Amino acid sequence: MRIELTPQQNQARSEFKAFVDEAIIPYANRCDRKEHTPPELIEKLAQQGYLGAALPKDKGGSGMDAITYGLLNEEIGRGCSSLRSLLTVHNMVSQALLKWGNKFQKENWLPKLASGEVIAAFALSEPNVGSDAKSIETTATRSGDFYVLNGQKKWITYGQIADVFLVFAQCEGKPSAFLVEKNSPGLTIKPIFGMLGVRASMLAELHLHDCKIPLENLVCRQGFGFSHVASSALDYGRYSVAWGCVGIAQACLEACIQYTSQRQQFGVYLKEHQLIRQMIAEMLVNVKAARLLCYQAGYLKDIGAPKSIMETSIAKYFASTTATKAANDAVQIHGGNGCSSEYSVQRYLRDAKIMEIIEGSNQIQQITIAEYGYQEHLFPPTRPVISQELVAKI
């Protein structure tokens, strides 16, 4: 089988690269140091149509196919993982509403999300709940024409600036999803600073104290918040993160090739040392392998294959480990310079570590991938490729 991008996908990739090189890379380290993303940078994403990249054109989006959307995430991830995180969570909410939202939610929110008029954030994690997401403690109780939410959300990407949140809560003991606007009474937003990586992603805690929202803000139905809304959104998030990890690893490779071609030790350029060449070779091979896994996941998404869910999980697992290994080697190759804020490789290493945790930690991915392996090889004729129980765990 020959894997080859279409002329349109190649053209899009070139455009993405040019945008990142000009509009993102020169400012990425500054954003990291200040733990802040400038509004004008987000506006540039919106002007390019990237905030609506995954939405169909009839909803105001760019209508990108899965592979083109992946290429976009790779390039933005190459430039700034924090900004790529905005693309991830914003489109996770968009995709959740596109698939599970009611008519009013789609007509009211999707065009605003596509244009960037409204910024969305995904609010699932809590102080006591991470990987075991279905055990959320936040509650929602119906009171007349409103739902009243109580609880706390943590590590909410771009929560400091989001206009609307997709919040998950237990409603009558059933995990459910709700849209909560930032000006909802009873909602307090507290910024989070001092993170290891993706420092410019403007994390926040959400405190919901008798937070009242209209009944029509329920997304899908009660009890479907995790199994349907969150699961489909997280699958899209994992896909975005996987491609973003390829971008980090590619950035490491490019930085190391440039540095070893300029830096001399023992009278020769670093690139002439055999152990350096070994590290570069491993980096190059792993980047290509991770990208191929992402291509496979994207192709399966484009044709609507159920297997795409697990292939996305595999791609995310391998790409995140690749990014961390590449970034660790990049810092090592740069030596003392690699530990300095003057060089981007230290940011790549910190950001890559975060990728092994978000959208399903690598340990969770290993558990689900292994279970999938047993299902596929022990029961191929009679068992589905992915059981509902397995989907819920990913």
Image (tube, grey):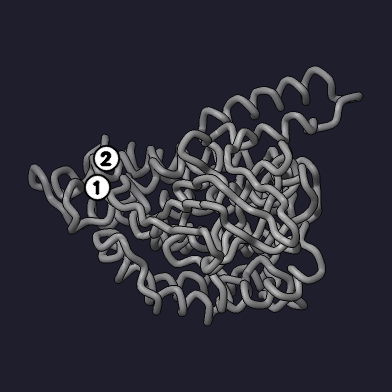
Tell me which residue sits at (60%, 69%) in the image: 10
Instruction: Look at the image and tell me in which quarter the C terminus lies.
Output: top right
Residue 271 is tagged as: 1
Marks 1 and 2 close (CB-CB < 8 Å): yes
Q: Residues within 10 Å of mark 2 (few under 14, many from 20)?
A: some
Q: 324 and 50: which one is in front?
A: 50
Upstream in sequence: badge 1 or badge 2: 1
What residue type is disc 2 on? Ile
In the depicted structure, whether residue 92 falls above or below residue 134: below
Q: Is residue 70 left or right of residue 261?
A: right
What residue type is disc 1 on? Lys
Which x, y percent locates residue 246? Answer: 48, 50
Q: Badge 2 is on which residue?
A: 276
Tell me which residue sits at (71%, 36%) in the image: 173
Query: What count of labels does the image hold?
Result: 2
Q: Is residue 305 left or right of residue 155?
A: right
Q: Secondary structure at mark 1?
A: helix
Q: Find the residue positioned furthest to the left.
A: 267
Q: Is residue 196 left or right of residue 80?
A: left
Q: Secondary structure at mark 2?
A: helix
Which x, y percent locates residue 33? Answer: 24, 60
Res. 72 in view: no
Tell me which residue sits at (62%, 63%) in the image: 69
Q: 330 and 185: which one is in front?
A: 185
